[in-house]
């Protein structure tokens, strides 16, 4: 029997790659986007036009959700806003996107399809400044940004609807995902995409604080494989898993790998901008033993391999920048 999935935010970086993976693996996928004419959305989903059922609308609209969640085997509420610093500038808008949207999906599932599997896309920023490395799922959550607070809120909604209504939802606390087509409509990127874009222009890559801070970087194919496991593995419902990369890497080492991959760009150190310093969490490297032991998942793609694949499939905006 063909499984049916609903991907909210299908035009986003994660949502578009997830839709592609599910279709490739035989799922029937419906994707919801706010504006199908947006050029970034069109580019991300263009090759899926023949297979993806695309719906334009508000991913938090109760009437739309009631109609779309019915009959689904899995629901991925991946629509929302990202960015710690941006959330401090527009906290109410961030709450609307990352709080109300999750609650609207869960309510629709409660009303129309409480047996559907769901995944909450959490964040490493829920932990805040970490006390120890690697960071286990039991680490205290003390976010230092509005975005992190709202991710904690969304996770709590999901865990409540699992314990109270039996909706089989799984939480993934996602680290720093990267890969092709990560650029956003405003022209910005995740940190890896930003560095690739700057290097492609031969521009400076600015490292705040000397670039000594440690992160892990999760290639998008590894993340989408975990997303699928979260809605197919029998042990996943009600659980929380770190979705982290295979190794800890300093920001400087990542930048150096970008320069080597592109063959251009220079690295310079810079002072912390005030808005970035206020939400900086320090070193982070997530422990993935729980996902490995429960789901049999491990991140497979190392940084250099992932950078090479991202650069080889670079988007038109990156190509133009070069």
Image (tube, rainbow, N blue to C red):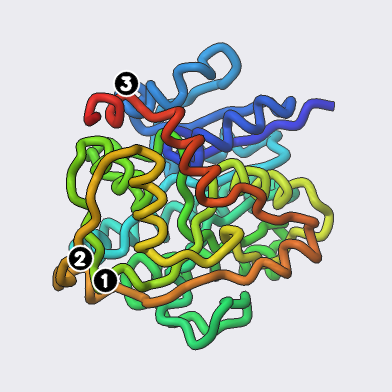
Discs 2, 3 touching: Cβ within 8 Å? no
**Image position, residue 17 (x, y; %):** 53, 35
Exactly how many numbered labels are in the figure? Answer: 3
Q: Which mark is residue 140?
A: none
Q: Residue furthest bottom?
A: 131
Q: Is residue 36 visible?
A: yes
Real-space Cα separation, disc 2 to disc 3, in angstroms: 39 Å
Which comes sooner in the sequence, label 2 or label 1? 1
Real-space Cα separation, disc 2 to disc 1, in angstroms: 5 Å
Discs 2, 1 touching: Cβ within 8 Å? yes
> What residue is disc 2 on?
269
Q: Is residue 97 visible?
A: no
Rate crowding at label 3 as few (under 14), some (14 to 19) or many (20 or more) other CA atoms within 10 Å. few
> What residue is disc 1 on?
210
**Image position, residue 292 (x, y; %):** 76, 62
> What residue sits 54% from the left and 47% below the top?
219
* 57 is higher (above) or lower (below) than 303: above
Q: Depth check: 270 or 22 in front?
A: 270
Number of the front mark, 2 or 3: 2
- Disc 1 element: helix
Real-space Cα separation, disc 1 to disc 3, in angstroms: 41 Å
């Amino acid at each position: 029997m063909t499984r049916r999935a609903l991907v909210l935010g299908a035009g986003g970086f994660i949502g578009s790659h997830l839709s592609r993976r599910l279709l490739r693996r035989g799922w029937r996928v419906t994707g919801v986007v706010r504006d199908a004419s947006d050029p970034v959305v069109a580019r991300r989903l263009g090759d899926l036009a023949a297979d993806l059922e695309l719906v334009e609308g508000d991913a938090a609209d109760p009437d739309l959700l009631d109609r779309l969640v019915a009959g689904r085997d899995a629901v991925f509420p991946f629509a929302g806003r990202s960015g710690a610093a941006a959330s401090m500038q527009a906290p109410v808008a961030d709450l609307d996107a990352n709080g109300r949207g999750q609650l609207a999906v869960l309510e629709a599932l409660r009303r129309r399809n409480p047996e559907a599997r769901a995944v909450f896309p959490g964040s490493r920023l829920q932990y805040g400044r970490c006390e120890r490395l690697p960071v286990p799922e039991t680490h205290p959550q003390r976010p230092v940004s509005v975005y992190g607070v709202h991710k904690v809120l969304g996770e709590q909604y999901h865990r409540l609807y699992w314990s109270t209504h039996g909706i089989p939802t799984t939480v993934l606390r996602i680290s720093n995902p990267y890969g092709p087509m990560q650029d956003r409509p405003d022209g910005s990127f995740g940190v890896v995409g930003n560095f690739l874009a700057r290097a492609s222009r031969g521009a400076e890559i600015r490292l705040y604080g000397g670039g000594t801070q440690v992160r892990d970087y999760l290639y998008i194919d590894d993340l989408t494989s975990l997303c699928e496991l979260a809605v197919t593995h029998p042990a996943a419902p009600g659980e929380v898993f770190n979705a982290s990369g295979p190794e800890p890497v300093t920001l400087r080492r990542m930048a150096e790998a970008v320069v080597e991959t592109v063959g251009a760009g220079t690295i310079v150190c810079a002072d912390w901008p005030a808005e970035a310093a206020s939400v900086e969490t320090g070193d982070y490297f997530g422990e993935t033993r729980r996902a490995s032991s429960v789901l049999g998942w491990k991140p497979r793609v190392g940084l250099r391999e992932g950078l090479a694949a991202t650069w080889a499939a670079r988007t038109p905006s990156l190509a133009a920048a070069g």
